Image (tube, rainbow, N blue to C red):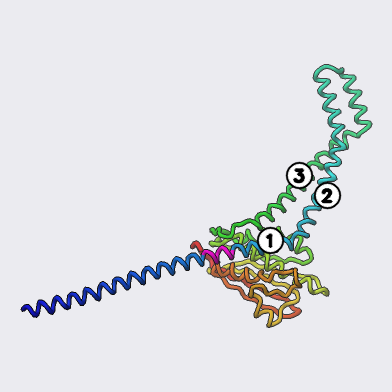
Amino acid sequence: MAEDDYNYKKAYLREKSARDQLETLLEDKTRALFIVNQELEEKLETVKNQQITLMQSEKMATLGTLSAGMAHEINNPLAYITSNVESIKFIKPVLVSLMTAAQKFVDKSISVSQLESILVQLNQENDLSFIVDDIDDLVDDTQEGLERIAHIVSNLVDFASLKDNVTAMADITESLNGTLKLLDNQLGTCAIELHIEKIPLTQCNLSSMKQVFVNLLINAKHACDSQFDQQGKITIKLFANKNNIYIEVADNGCGMDGDTLKQIFDPFFTTKPVGQGTGMGMAIVYNILKEHNGTIEVESEVNKGSLIRCVIPISTKCM
């Protein structure tokens, strides 16, 4: 009986030792996994921040490309605003004289006949009926010009702003419409054909999607501009089925050969002259679509044009 107790105790101690070693090993592995997980989370956050910085840099580069067109768009309304202000400055002394005469009449410092004499003289010198007809147009045109400039600046600020982590249920059509307004002057050399269908809301980042549209359309425009013997044409389609939203941008530009197609999504790869491209445009488009669990397909033929097709799954879940 004593020997059985001894053997039982020995087996119990051996089992306890093994269990303690296993628990220690498990604690060590759990601690190591926790540390590795923390490091991975930190690295993931670093990568996300670097991607945001990279996208912001690409936006700044794109704004540089758009600057000449934006300057032209702002200069047009600015020119007639300046002209209208000059006309209003010419009218100002007449209005001051009229209000001064009216105030004197109200204060009874001049008589009716004196007021009539002042008005007749002002009308002979300035044609008051013309001023009455003209001043509304001057003010309305000036206000319209200022609103147009404010709208252009607002589009630029919205495009350049840091909203890259904001996702929500939204209509991607908003990004397309905003991009077309932003690039209105830039795309002026091309005929634009739009086929936009009603699409469902999906969980997405509208700011990032605007970057997708900007990069695709600028690339299509540059491809068209390189074909000097024909009118550039860009066809944009936005539609959806039960599961996906489709974005298609087609052009009749220079197209791409097989070697270019293989490298189109590689960072820093560009076919543009030095100083005219960052080589990050399509790489950023690829990453944005990947963040939306989407895909991108490219069909192209040299001297025939290209078709870019983006497929984005419809989602109601936060990314």
Q: Does 278 sit above or below residue 152?
A: below
Q: Mark 3 or mark 1, which is nearer the start of the sequence?
A: 1
Q: Dots 3 and 2: beta carbons under 8 Å? A: no
Q: Is residue 205 left or right of residue 121?
A: left
Residue 228, percent from left and from top: 82, 73
Other-residue count near label 1 (Cα within 10 Å), few / some / many at <14 / 14–19 / ≥20: some
Q: Residue at x 37, y 68 (%)?
A: 31
Camera-side mark, 1 or 3: 1
Give SS at disc 2.
helix
Give SS at disc 1.
helix
- Which residue matches tag 1? 60
Tag on residue 143? 3
Q: Quadrant of the N terminus?
A: bottom left
Give SS at disc 3.
helix
Q: Which residues are magenta?
A: 45-51
- Which residue is at the front of the view, 272 or 133? 272
- Which residue matches tag 2? 79
Badge 2 amino acid:
Ala
Residue 189, percent from left and from top: 79, 65
Q: Mark 1 or mark 2, which is nearer the start of the sequence?
A: 1
Q: Is residue 122 left or right of residue 74?
A: right
Q: Residue at x 74, y 61 (%)?
A: 66
